[in-house]
Amino acid sequence: MSAAAPGLPPIPTRFGFAFSTAGGWAACLSALQDEVTLERWDLTRPVPSRRTLGDDPAAPAGGGPLLDRRCGVLPLDDGRVLILRPATGDHGEPAGHGTVLAAQPSGTGLRVTRTWPVPSMLAGFLLAAPGPDGAVLLVTAEDEGHSRIWRLTDSSPALDPVLRIPGVLSGGVWLDGGRTLALDHAEAGHRTDGILVDLRERGWRRIWSVSDTTTDRIAAYNRRSGVLAVTTTAPGAQQPGTEQIGLRLPGGDPVRFPETLNGPARPRAPLTFDHGGENLLVRETHGATERLAVYTPAADRLSTVPGPPGLVSPPACWAPDGRIHLRFTSPSRPPTLATVTPAGQWRPAPHPHDTGGWADAELVELPGPDGPIETIVYGGPGWRRHRRLVLALHGGPLAAWRFEFEPLFQHLAAAGIAVAAPNHRGSTGYGDRHLRPILGDWGGPDLADVLHLAWAIADERDLVGLPRPVVLGGSYGAFLALLAACYSPDLWSGCVALAPFTSAASLHGTAPGTVRDRVSRLSRCDAQAGTGRDVLRVCQALTAPLLLAHGARDEVIPVAQSRALRERLLELGRTEGVDFDYLEADDDHHGVVQAWSPVLREAVVRFCLAAERTYVLDQEGR
């Protein structure tokens, strides 16, 4: 069940974007295979200039690389870059400590000028306060139940512990020049709320909490205007999993939720205020794409910022000169720093290792059983009649395919395989009517959409003697893919399931607490227990070749789920290596369903190239 894969191009990527507090510098990590470098942009120039920096060429050999994919970076206004390096064990798991390094660009490398050991840390992030003398803070999760805030100073080689707070901290919005910090805070018994930390008094208190069952965050603040932007998932949000945006104006008035900003048609999220605090930059979701818009509170006006189709992501920097800097990606453009000028021109920066030539995609609407289904397709206008075709199902369930650079799809396209990635019912970004049908009904309306699309595609391919599609999914999408392959076994040339679970009930019984809570809220797993939506109960019907892959260190969906399916297939008399392939990687959930290691990507491509089940219709019989 394997075929020779073509030479697959290395995939460049950027991640961990951050801006200096005054907005003069940006930085991120850039990776090409195992090589990780730091990219730093000077944003004060009319066209931002980039500098790619690696290890210090003068450093002694044998010390190991300075940067890896787990690092975090923060550019400072003085031109230095702070690097947070979590220590890891032999298998990549957090070792519980780490190091903060201050580095100065030196030629093509980074010269480390100071280090601060971090004695206790599972994860963390860096923050710098506004102003030339602003504080630099490290916020760490010490364990699952406590976080600590540390202060970094050039005069001391040791971190100054400011205070320890029960719960997990995230975000970070300064309300003044360096004394008062707002953070998002998740504690046992609560979802998420906003707290205020007084660094001088070393105390904290809640300032934004709607209820114990809502996710309430502090998104942005402008010290000039005194306007605070918050979000909440309280009743009234556009759809489950989306947020209302609230504004608190100066004077102590209650938070208000402008209807213009929270219309039901387009979910929005706040990014940042302009320099004067008169306008709020927001991200709008339009199905699979995202775009920018500007909300002006004084006029209650929302204005769209035209731009290329793709995905925009935080953090965002709205500079005093009116330029906007943020992360941007599209199907044929790896993630990059994009600059939007006051005149509305978009200027995405090229990747230094990007030679171009990536496959582009288009958005099409395919007829579904309950209305059109927006689908991202690779393969051009004739994608339906490519020799090989993959129908890709996204994870979730509250998720969607986005119009962004997708490494796995690029590898499939490079091998001549067309891809159709539908946002079936249950996908976010299409309104409440499209999302709600699957709440409490996993493998119901969403699976009906998948089978409807696949049969229409297969019928057309049968007419010209082409192989039927391969169904591929990761996480929740892998559960759907397995059900589709079991319910309609003749429909598929093959099935690829990456980190699947076998039923809502079994996942609820074995998953970690946070995942178990999510399954309880969204699946009605008790009602589905013992039904046909259990892969272990229906897999005897599976006849298409299967590639089953899971991470041995999966912290979301335990690897026992795939191991149980493997054992069940063996009990049914299926032969591993003939009827199905099983791949267990030394990786976590993200590594299998999103990071797509080279070994896994090549295994998927080889499998899809080998899928050759064809059904040529007998015209006379029909």
Image (tube, rainbow, N blue to C red):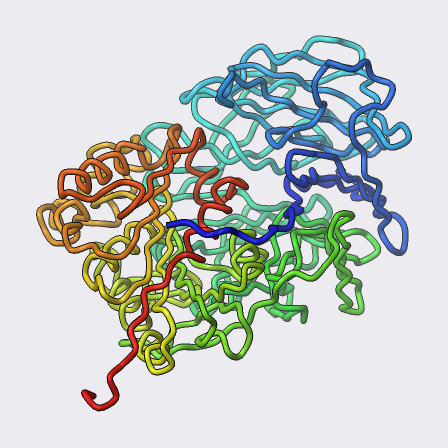
Q: Is residue 334 left or right of residue 399?
A: right
Give the quadrant of residue 345. bottom right
Q: Is residue 220 above or below residue 163?
A: below
Of 523 and 409, nearer the camera is 409
Q: Is residue 65 above or below residue 298?
A: above
| Farthest residue, direction left | 530
Residue 292 placement (x, y as % from top left) = 63, 63
Residue 56 placement (x, y as % from top left) = 83, 23
Q: Is residue 325 above or below residue 331?
A: above
Q: Is residue 206 left or right of residue 563?
A: right
Task: Identify the image quadrant of the C terminus.
Answer: bottom left
Q: Is residue 316 above or below residue 557?
A: below
| Farthest residue, direction bottom | 620
Residue 227 placement (x, y as % from top left) = 63, 50
Q: Is residue 290 left or right of residue 234?
A: right
Of 293 and 223, nearer the camera is 293
Q: Residue at x 43, y 58 (%)?
A: 400
Residue 297 appears in the rendering = no
Q: Residue at x 28, y 33 (%)?
A: 511
Residue 18 appears in the rendering = yes
Give the quadrant of residue 112. top right
Residue 432 placement (x, y as % from top left) = 34, 65
